[in-house]
Image: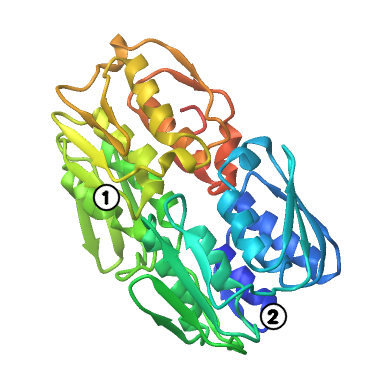
Amino acid sequence: MYNRALIAQSYLPAIDIQGQSKADDVEKMRAALQAFSTGQTQFDVGQAGTVLRFLALRVSRKEGKYVLNGSRRLMARPQAELIRLLAQLGCQVETTDTTFEIRSYGWHLHGDGLFIKGNESSQFASALLLNSWLFERDLYIHLQGEQVSQGYLEMTIQMMKALGMVIQLTDNEIHVAPFQTPRAVKLSLEPDMSSSFAVAAFAAAGGSAHFPKFPSDSLQPDAIFPEMLDKLGAKVESLASGLKVSQSSKLVGAEFFIENCPDTFPVLSALCFLAEGASEIRGGSHLKFKESDRLGEMAALFEKLGRKPEMFDDGLKFDGSPVRPESAPELDFDPKEDHRLAMAVALLNSQGFRIKIKDKSVVNKSFPEFWDIVGENI
């Protein structure tokens, strides 16, 4: 939400963003937009797919040659749809293992519509919407094929509407009228629900956590996590003071469909690994396009620990009883620059498993306070 708000604010600095974040992704976006506003043309996007995609569309609104520098893992993630979208806007793109170079003449549409595939990520459509302010032509955005992570696109649409954008929606088309200017409003941003889920999972597995002023009607699809924890047998209470999550007698297996909230998968799968009985997580065909192949990495880890899940193209299934930590081997684990994998492994360690995380600093991407909250020694 914060990075979406920063893009909008780059079109109207008078937008007042209420909230804060020290996440690396937000710092990268803030620094890049500041540099862009002063005429710079090279930007560091680090490991951040959100920053790369949103910023690429932002800088392409202005004629020039721009270089976005990122990690090898980021540039190895699927970028073909971003390149295809920029080509439809009249831009040229060249890439290397660590750079994404854009030659833009300003947006020049080649036809009446723009076509975006949604089977890998909703961020391409979000990037286009976020940067459609002040454009002089109608934008007809056609969403092609299977659409994943729809909840994140809906979050973008709702934020744009809050800023005054008139958007017309049909089944697979989004129409944005021309010459729209954002309103100078206060944007009150919610806490990050993916990070909140990571903390709540620790409480569900062994402890308690309180989330003051937890939103009752969140825009974020990951806000479904209290329902997930309730299905797993945790004690979940909605109080006047916020949300409280605490451990019950044991975690029990349950079924989940995560197509709209894929960022929950690593931590959710760790909870299912710890739970008694059958659990199944489906709807994650796009997990391989994230910071790592989250499905493959977590399944391989679980097998090494002694509870092999059945693996599908879009998820996994556990049967039987959980592994006793003392019977599992000690392991080294490389999170592959993926913050959510590190959080999931930390959850397992909190329950007695002995997994050495190679690079614990990866959590700084989204949640630099994580180790302060859950414990440095996990």
Spatial distance from mark 1 to mark 2, Cα to Cα? 38 Å
Name the disc covering residue 1, or none.
none
Q: Within the image, what quadrant is residue 337 found in? A: top right
Q: Is residue 101 left or right of residue 6?
A: right
The local crowd at label 1, few if under 14, some if 14 to 19, many if 20 or more residues have their Cα within 10 Å, is many
Q: Residue at x 65, y 54 (%)?
A: 52
- On the question of residue 1 being in view, the answer is no
Number of marks present in the image shown? 2
The local crowd at label 2, few if under 14, some if 14 to 19, many if 20 or more residues have their Cα within 10 Å, is few
Q: Nearer the viewer, residue 196 or 60?
A: 60
Q: Position of residue 152 (x, y in %)?
A: 42, 62
- Residue type at mark 2? Pro
Q: Within the image, what quadrant is residue 224 found in? A: bottom left
Q: Position of residue 50 (x, y in %)?
A: 58, 55
Q: Residue at x 59, y 46 (%)?
A: 365
Q: Nearer the viewer, residue 221 or 109?
A: 109
- Residue type at mark 1? Val
Q: Is residue 284 above or below residue 20?
A: above
- On the question of residue 193 being in view, the answer is yes
Q: Is residue 216 above or below residue 249?
A: below
Q: Kindly identify which residue carries mark 2.
A: 13
Q: Kindly identify which residue carries mark 1.
A: 245
Q: Are marks 1 and 2 in contact (CB under 8 Å)?
A: no
Q: Helix, strand or loop at disc 1?
A: strand
